[in-house]
Image (tube, helix red, strand yellow):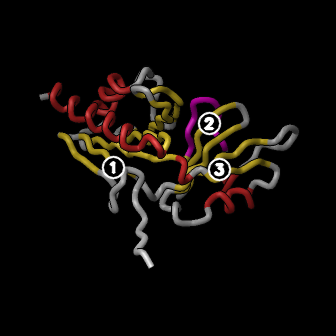
Amino acid sequence: MPDLSPLCATGGSAPAEARHGVLSIRENPELALASVARRQGAPEPSPLGLSLPGPGGWTAAGEVSAFWTGPDQWMIEGHGLADSDFAARVAADCPDASVTEQTDGFVAFEIRSSAGERPITDLLAKLVNLDPQRLQPGSAARTGLEHLGVFVIRRAPDRLAVIGMRSAAGSLWHALETAISRQVEVAA
């Protein structure tokens, strides 16, 4: 029988990671994702006790968080829960909503600054067509990054997450890692 080992979205047996100056980037294979859509006439869901955010919002409580993806639609994140049946857990908590497993369809990259907020703000200004001042901590947006559609989440002043399609993980990694390395060159 062949030895089957799981691979990260970027193709390695371990998550891709890099550090350039004060910025680091790491693939996050532990992030579980489930989409939630409120059915017509149903009450607003409250998956796993979360109060769901409005347009442009992101909220977190313990090991779960959520961001708005469209009218009556959200993506629920399970931090460290990718190996569980996260969507079933969310569905059990939201019987009047449509819940779909999304974990294997997306890849998440976490970007951190060891020098506070400024390097993240500067990176955002170069990375995506979003005003960094409008993408404050606790906010999320869907936008384009190079030729890819992504979700950008401002988790904290010094932290940013970029979530894109798993099938484009290599291209997304290349775009992010290149932008981070160039940001360091500009700062030097």
User: Where is residue 108 shown, x and y percent of the image?
Assistant: 44, 46
User: Where is residue 127 shown, x and y percent of the image?
Assistant: 35, 27
Task: Give SS at disc 3.
Answer: loop
Q: Number of numbered discs present?
A: 3
* Residue at the spot of label 3: 50
Q: Quadrant of residue 92?
A: bottom right
Mark before the other along the chain sequence, 3 or 2: 3
At a point 73% along the width and 42% down the height, the residue shown is: 37
* Residue at the spot of label 1: 26
Residue 85, above or below 97: below
Q: CA distance from mark 3 to mark 1?
A: 26 Å
Mark before the other along the chain sequence, 1 or 2: 1
* Residue at the spot of label 2: 68
Residue 49, above or below 149: below
Residue found farthest to the left: 188
Q: Nearer the viewer, mark 3 or mark 2?
A: 2
Answer left or right for 13 relative to 82.
left
The stretch of residues the image draws in magenta is: 52-59
Q: Quadrant of residue 56?
A: top right
Residue nearest the viewer, comparing 176 with 159: 176
